[in-house]
Image (tube, coloured by chain):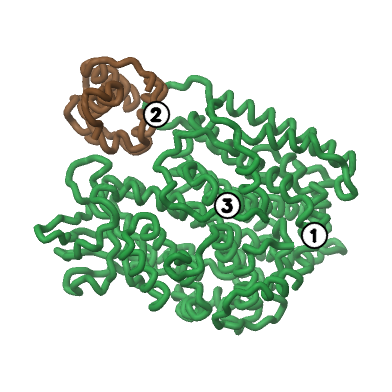
Chain colours: A brown, B green
Amino acid sequence: MNCVPFDLPHYRNKLSAMVEREMRLEQGTVASDRNLAEYGLDSIAALTIAGDLEDELGIELPPTLLWDYPSIDDLASYLLAAANPNLGDVA
Amino acid sequence: MIPAQYLEALMMEQALGDPWLATNALSYVQALAMDEEDAFPEVQVTALNAIGLPQSYVPTAYGGTFRNCETFVAMGRVLARRNMSVAVAYSTMLWSTLGWLGGSEAQKRDIARWIMDHGSFPCLAYSEAEHGADLSANQLTATLNEDGSYTLNGEKWPINRAIRSDFLVLLARTDAAAHMRNHSLFIVHKNQLNSRCYYHLPRVKTHGLKGCDISGIGFRDCVIPASCLVGTEGHGLELALKGFQVTRTFCTALSLGVGDTALRLVADYASCRRLYGDSIDRLPHTQDVLANAYTSQLIAESVSIVSARGLHVCPELYSSWSSIAKVEVCHLVDFSCKQLSGVLGARFYMRDQQGVGIFQKFIRDGAVVSIFDGSSVVCLDSLATLLDTLTRDNTPPPTESCLTLLFDLEATLPALDYARLKLFSREGDPLMGAVPQLIERLEQLSPCGDCGEQALQRLKDAGRRFLDEVVRLKAEIREPVARGGRNSARRFSQAERYCAVYGVAACLGIWLFNREKFGSAFKTGLWLEAVLQRELSAEFRSGTLEPRLASALFEHMDSQRKRGEMFSIMSWPLAKTDRAEQMRRVDVHKEHYDELRTF
C-alpha cells in the first residue's frame, strides 16, 4: 500500500469531484450519504470510477468497490481504512 | 489432422447425418418446413436428448461430460450448421452455467439430475419488457419472508423457452433501492411453483428463429423456497454478468455454424450456376467474395478457438474477452453473409429453388446472435470502458507457456475454474501484449517447402505492418479523452478495431503454434497473408485481396468443399452425402477418434 493517508473529508471531496465529473453532474450535486445509483451510476461508470481511483491512489481496489460501497461516505470510509489499516477492519 | 478435443463433435456430426437428406431430423428440408410453420423443433430436440447431448452441458464432476470449452464450441457448431432454430432452442441448456458458477453443491447436484436424468431445460428469466439491457432497473420482486422463502411478483419477457422450460434461472429484485446489489439470482424448478401463482405469456412471432419459444412468464404472490437462492442475496447482477462471460464466448459456435452453411450453399450454387459459358465461381468477383468469406470464417474460427481455450487459461480477462469474441465473430460472419447473398442474385429471394431457399433462413437466424447475451453495442460499450486497462504497458508480456496453452491445439488445458472469473478485469490484455512476441517469432522462421522465401518475406512484412497498426491503436486509445458521460462514438470505433486486432493476433498465434499440424494449405500461410492484407476490419471490399491470394484462398475453400470438410483450419470431415442419421447414444472411445480423423 503506497498511498498517502488523508482524512475523511479529503476522500469525500475527491470522490465527489470524480463522481460528478464521470456522471456529468454539476459540482455539489451529489449528497455524500445517498446511493450513487440514484444519480444514474451504472456498472460501466462504476468500473471507470474504480479504475480512476486505482490510478490516482496507486492502490489496487476490488472491481466491485462501488457495488459494495455505494455512497461517497461509504467509499471514503473504505479508502481511509484501506490507507490506514490500523484504524480498523475494512468490511 | 484434427485434435483429440474435437472427437465428440466429429462423432455428433456423423450421428446427425447429411443435412441434405430430407429424412434426417436435422435436414435442411425439415428446417425449412418447420420455419414455414413457425413450428418448435420437437422431434429434433427429442432426438438430441436421445444421443445424450444433455450430458455435454454438465461438468464431469457432476456426472456429465463437459470438460473442455473448445469441445463444447465445436459441438455447437455442428448443430448450428444444420438448423439454428434447433441450436438455439437447445442452447438454453447452457444457462445451467449459472448453477456451476454460483450454486451450492446441492443445487449443482439437482441441476445435473434435472438435465441428465429428465432432459429438463432451463430458461434465462432476466429480461423485462420495460428495461432491456438495464438489468439493475428490473422490477420483478422477490420479497424475503420470515421463514426464509421468497415471494415473487412481476413478469419476465421476452424469454427464450419460457413456456417450454422446466426450470428458471431467475433474476429478481430483492431490494427496492437503486443500487447494484439490489438483485438476487434464483434457480427454481417449475414443480416448486404453485400453478395458481404463475402464468405464461404467449409466444411472440419473430423474423428469425421462427420456431423458437420466445415467450414470457409472470408471477402473482408466488412463493419459492429459500433453497432456490443462488449464492448471496444481493449478488445476482454480479453472477448474471459473470455468466455472460461464459455464454458470450460460446455464442461464437452459433455464428460459425451459420458462416459455414452460408458459404457452402453459395459456393455450391456458384459451382453449378453457368453464365457466360462457365460456372460463375470462375468469375473474378465471385471468387473474391468466396475467398473473403472463407478468410472471414477462418478468422472467426481462430477467435472462437482462442477465446474458448482462454476460458481455461485466463478466465480473469473474460469481462473483455467474451465481448471481443462475440462481437468479432458475429461481425465477420454477418458481413460475409450479406456479401454472399449477392452471389445468389435473384435466388436469394426465392424460398425453394435449387437448394438455396435455406440461405435466407440462416441469414435471418444468424443475425439474431448479435443480440444474444448482451448486444454487440452493449458488448462494445463495456469493452470501450476497459480499453485503457487492456492496453496498459505495466502488465508483463505473457509467458511462453501461456501462449502455448492459448494457441497450440495439442496442449492440454487446465480445468475450467469458474471461481477465477472476475466482474471486471484490471489487467493488461496478454493477447495484445503478445503481438510483439508473435511478430518476433514470425521473424525467426526459416523458409520451407510449403512457405518459401518470398511467401515468408511477405508474411514478415505484413506482420511488421500489423505491429505498427497495433502500436498506433494503443497510442490512440491512450490519447486523453474528455471524461464523463457515455463512451463516445470514437471510443466505440477503437473498441471495434481492438476486436479486429484480437482476431488477427489469434490467427497469427494459431498459425505459428500449429504450422506442422494441419497440412500443406495451412502451412503455406497464404490464409494468414490474406488476413493481414485485409488489415483491421471484419468487413471486406472487392479488390482488397491481391488476385493471387483471392485465387489461392478460393482454391483452398473449394477443395475443402469438394472433400466434404468443414470450412476450417483443420481437416474436419462432415457427414457424407446421403448419410442417414444414427440417433443413439455412443460413448466416446479412442478408436472412434482414430477412425474419424482419417475419415
Taking depth in this image into account, of B468 and A57 the one nearest to the observer is A57
Q: Which residue is mark 3?
A: B309
Taking depth in this image into account, of A68 and A81 the one nearest to the observer is A81
Spatial separation of the CA atoms under disc 1 and disc 3: 36 Å
Q: Amino acid at mark 1?
A: Asp
Q: Quadrant of residue B101?
A: bottom left
Residue B339 can be seen in this image = no
Q: Is residue B182 left or right of residue B310?
A: left
Q: Where is residue B575? Give x, y as percent.
A: 68, 74
Other-residue count near label 3 (Cα within 10 Å), few / some / many at <14 / 14–19 / ≥20: many
Camera-side mark, 1 or 3: 3
Q: Chain of mark 1?
A: B
Q: Is residue B449 left or right of residue B374?
A: right
Spatial separation of the CA atoms under disc 3 and disc 2: 28 Å
Q: Please tell me whether mark 2 sits on a helix, a strand or a loop.
A: loop
- Whether residues under marks 2 and 1 lie with C-beta atoms below 8 angstroms apart, the answer is no
Question: Where residue A60 is drawn, which disc sits there?
Answer: 2
Where, quadrant-wise, is the N terminus of chain B in this rendering? bottom right
Q: Which residue is mark 1?
A: B281
Q: Quadrant of residue A15?
A: top left
Camera-side mark, 2 or 1: 2
Spatial separation of the CA atoms under disc 2 and disc 1: 57 Å
Q: Amino acid at mark 3?
A: Arg
Q: Earlier in the sequence, mark 1 or mark 3?
A: 1
Where, quadrant-wise, is the C terminus of chain B in this rendering? bottom right
Other-residue count near label 2 (Cα within 10 Å), few / some / many at <14 / 14–19 / ≥20: few
Q: Amino acid at mark 2?
A: Glu
Taking depth in this image into account, of B489 and B451 the one nearest to the observer is B451
Residue B501 versus residue B58 in the image, above or below: above
